[in-house]
Image (tube, rainbow, N blue to C red):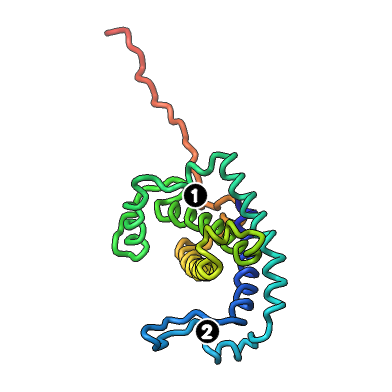
Amino acid sequence: MRWTHWVNFPLLTIMIWSGMLIYWSNDVYTLTIFGHQFFRFFPDWFNNFFNIPGRLAEGMAFHFLFMWFFALNGLIYVLYTIISGSWRELLPQRKSFKEAWLVLLHDLHIRKMAPPQNKYNAAQRIAYTAIIVMGFGSLITGLAIYKPVQFSTITWLCGGYHLARIAHFVLTIGYVFFFLIHVFQVVLAGWNNFRSVISGFEVVKTEPAIPQIDIETPKAPETDGK
């Protein structure tokens, strides 16, 4: 599980970077109301600063190559989670959505006592399950964009090419927010927790055990009753 977690990090980074190269070649998404544009995701100065325009072929080459590794890594993770039974600790429970607010209040230092947890707390259950669903959604919408004719059924299920591209773009934004929150949570958890994610074990400092010394109580001298 740790291997697929760390392999997924550079894969997802390359996928987002190459996907942005593709998107920047046709930067069409803006916040426009009644013909007035209020917000554009990537203004021209941003594209010019990073020398982004004119790199469509490069973005497509990287994106379409590494998507297979991304899909394979995700498949291995899901299969291992199912076969090992780890899904029982990962899926949200009925009380998870209620306890997630308590976790949030504790992280914001509004609530002192942390809610009980096993391997994952309620917020982690929801977040980690959501990221799996998002990965599946990116794969489906990506195929709908990649081969809209060959995968016409998938494209139709996604609401057409245009809606599939919007969903793919929104999921990418979701990954970025998840990554930022994830890193913030890791920083709050401390270095020891981060080290345990890499090594698989956690170093716990304990006080040295105090050796126990058996002290025999002297017995009273026996008397003959006189």
Quadrant in which residue 82 is drawn = top right
Residue at 38% x, 20% y is 219
Residue at 72% x, 72% y is 61
Which label number is shown at residue 114? none
Please rate how many residues cluster around mark 1, counting C-alpha atoms within 10 Å: few if below 14, some from 14 to 19, many from 20. few
Quadrant in which residue 10 is drawn = bottom right
Q: Nearer the viewer, residue 87 or 61?
A: 61
Q: Where does the image place residue 195, in percent across and percent down from the top left?
A: 57, 58
Q: Amino acid at mark 2?
A: Phe
Residue at 61% x, 44% y is 80
Which label number is shown at residue 206? 1
Q: Secondary structure at mark 2?
A: loop
Q: Is residue 180 visible?
A: no
Which one is in front in this view, the residue at disc 1 or the one at disc 2? 2
Placement of 150 over or under 219, stated as above or below:
below
Q: Where does the image place residue 170, in percent across and percent down from the top left?
A: 49, 69
Q: Secondary structure at mark 1?
A: loop
How much space separates mark 1 and mark 2, taking CA atoms?
52 Å
**Residue located beneath label 2 in the image:** 42
Q: Amino acid at mark 1?
A: Thr
Quadrant in which residue 153 is drawn = bottom right
Q: Nearer the viewer, residue 164 or 73?
A: 164
Placement of 217 over or under 63, stated as above or below:
above
Q: Is residue 36 visible?
A: yes
